[in-house]
Image: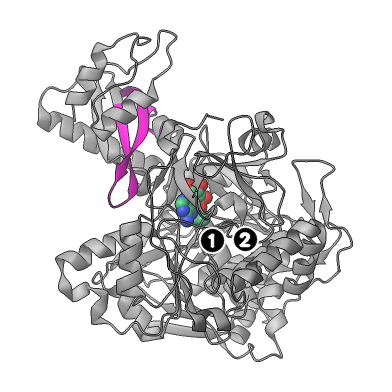
Amino acid sequence: MSAPSSAIESVLVENRVFPPSEATQKAARVAGMAAYEALCAEAEKDYEAYWARLARENVVWSKPFTQILDESNAPFYRWFADGELNASANCLDKHMGTAVEHKTAIIFEADDGQVTKVSYRELLNRVAQFANGLKAQGIKKGDRVLIYMPMTIEGVVAMQACARIGATHSVVFGGFSAKAVQERIVDVGASAVITANYQMRGGKELPLKAIVDDALQMGGCEHVGHVFVFERTATATHMVAGRDMTFAQLLDGQSTDCPPVAVDAEHPLFILYTSGSTGKPKGVQHSTGGYMLWAKQTVEWTFDMQPTDVFWCTADIGWITGHTYVAYGPLAAGATQIVFEGVPTFPHAGRFWQMIERHGCTVFYTAPTAIRSLIKAAETDEKVHPKNWNLSSLRILGSVGEPINPEAWMWYYRNVGGERCPIVDTFWQTENGGHMITPLPGATPLVPGSCTLPLPGITAAIVDETGNDLPNGAGGMLVVKRPWPSMIRNIWGDPERFKKSYFPEELGGKTYLAGDGAVRSEDRGYFRITGRIDDVLNVSGHRMGTMEIESALVSKTDLVAEAAVVGRPDDMTGEAICAFVVLKRPMPTDPEEAKALATELRNWVAKEIGPIAKPKDIRFGENLPKTRSGKIMRRLLRSIAKGEAITQDTSTLENPAILDQLSKTN
Ligand code: PRX
């Protein structure tokens, strides 16, 4: 746990306030601040009774729970532990026989613009058939299945089918490398992999199956008995006899009737890997009952989901946002949602606006990095400005993944929302399962750049290093004081790391440490997230551990002796990765040679982790700034990366001259 640095002191004062319109407030599920406060008061008065009420209202239990919160083995909290349910039944079966049965569940728009729609009934049939296929291949409750799929209806079907038979899925983002896939297969102990031959993004056909093949050849994957391949394109792909099977073969002759398997509330619905400050990615283990409760409830509260809404969350199913707000939450809420295969800039940077108009999207949820890149595109090319499309169907906008700067917020509010749509700036993390701190569209007065207030029952607070509450205006560490139902249950296979990472002894061992710095405003007590306080970078809303990138760099053993990675602010991606590298050979003096080496290293990192981890800057030096005890002084590297003059105390440095050298090289 690192102490908050002065960098997280509040420097930004934002005076603009946007209360909800009377009409929005009146029609909302949580209508007005008084309604929000009443929910908060209910949670405060009897915490367990509040959560039990929500669990009964939001989840269909095949066996009702009698226990609520079990804290006996803290911080391994258990919720509704004696209850049983099935997540897929909570998304699909429960709608059968209701008005939702024949409603459109998913409007899928492919990369090339082709549209396919499925109703809830059709989706259930497809999920059930897929689940029967998995069962026929011996996949059963408790097995782990790795999913490496493009954004498609089939991706959602694969997740739901695993849930239906009680298999725990672990989805890996389609942009990750073979090495990253292999590490996750090994760590999670997958018995099967579900993938596609190719994925289509931006008009390009990218191999997925070939990457899975590479991963499986790297060793340690002997437990993978099956690879199921969705034929997204007509291009042939290599198939291994006895192991690989196309979806067509898997589904052949399977019935569309598959009773959902009831699991305990605490049964792991999924394990999703995310970066931590040290070592390899963490397998964040989520529950079934508590997770489903919050997935549905937050869709209804934060997005005020109404029966006629057309929801669009642009996140990939490879991230937590794509789990909670594509694969589970909207379906549990019976919403119609858009699933998009492609990228926001293909065939032009107006694609999002065009799709909103085309499908009559009402609630749009995306990331600040996408907004910032579309602002830039609209500023350079009038033709892709949102004003060229009719966006009047929109009623609520959302933002997630990183702090949204007030300028981008205002642009989004004016040009996309027509100064009519509230923006919900939702703060949460992979470990949280669902929204934690966010405005409610029909209640909370909005302040650009602030995620405002915790949802009812979420005991978020800001504390110093010893856990003392800090007053409004003082920057500190973001914590959550009490367990909540959709929280992380464990790090897969590493309970010690779970305790150390999230419930440090310094804070008493029971307080959840988010790893972010935050500050509350003096006037309203609104939260503003100031960024990570550990060695985790947030690049375009994606979490990257500095250690992970450093290990990837030094694994290029013929070239790299030592590497240190830090973040620096970037207009477009929020943070950019900056790597300082000491080579095993003399430092390049010729700029062309330096450029070539930097490209080689960038490509190496892309191969080791994935293109999203490529350092933007690579600086070569003969050494790194170290203390006499050999510790790399990262705060100095951060200043150099930002191009700042070094004003900090450097008297403990072993080799002060190195600062000069690193500042000059590029
Ligand atoms: O630093 C915070 C930032 O994203 C981190 C969580 O990343 P991940 O687990 O990948 O989940 C992202 C999507 C839920 C947080 O620790 N973050 C996320 N949302 C916000 C944010 N920072 C500021 N404002 C947000 N709304």
What residue is at 68 percent from the left and 71 percent from the top?
88
Is the C terminus in the top left, top right, bottom left or bottom right quadrant?
Answer: top left
Q: Name the residue beneath numbered marker 1.
A: 438
Q: How is the image coloured?
A: one colour
Examine the structure image and report whether residue 570 is included in the region drawn in magenta. Answer: yes
Which SS does the magenta portion mostly show? strand
Query: What type is the residue that disc 1 sits on?
Result: Thr
Q: Which residues make up the magenta segment?
A: 552-580
Is the N terminus in the top left, top right, bottom left or bottom right quadrant?
Answer: top right
Q: Is 371 in front, or is 283?
A: 371
625 versus 169 height, above or below: above
Residue 294 picture quarter: bottom right
Q: Can residue 112 be seen in this view?
A: no
Cβ(mark 1) to ligand 1 < 8 Å? yes
Measured from the top left, where is residue 60 in percent x and y? 77, 74
* CA–CA distance in space, label 1 to label 2: 7 Å
Measured from the top left, where is residue 224 in percent x and y? 60, 51
Q: Name the residue beneath numbered marker 2.
A: 455
User: Which residue is farthest right?
Assistant: 66
Judge the density around disc 2: few (<14), some (14-19), many (≥20) Cα neighbours within 10 Å. many
Is label 2 in a helix, a strand or a loop? loop
The reply, left or right, for residue 281 in relation to residue 141 is left
Please say if the residues under marks 1 and 2 sit with CB atoms less than 8 Å apart. yes
The reply, left or right, for residue 425 in relation to residue 430 is left
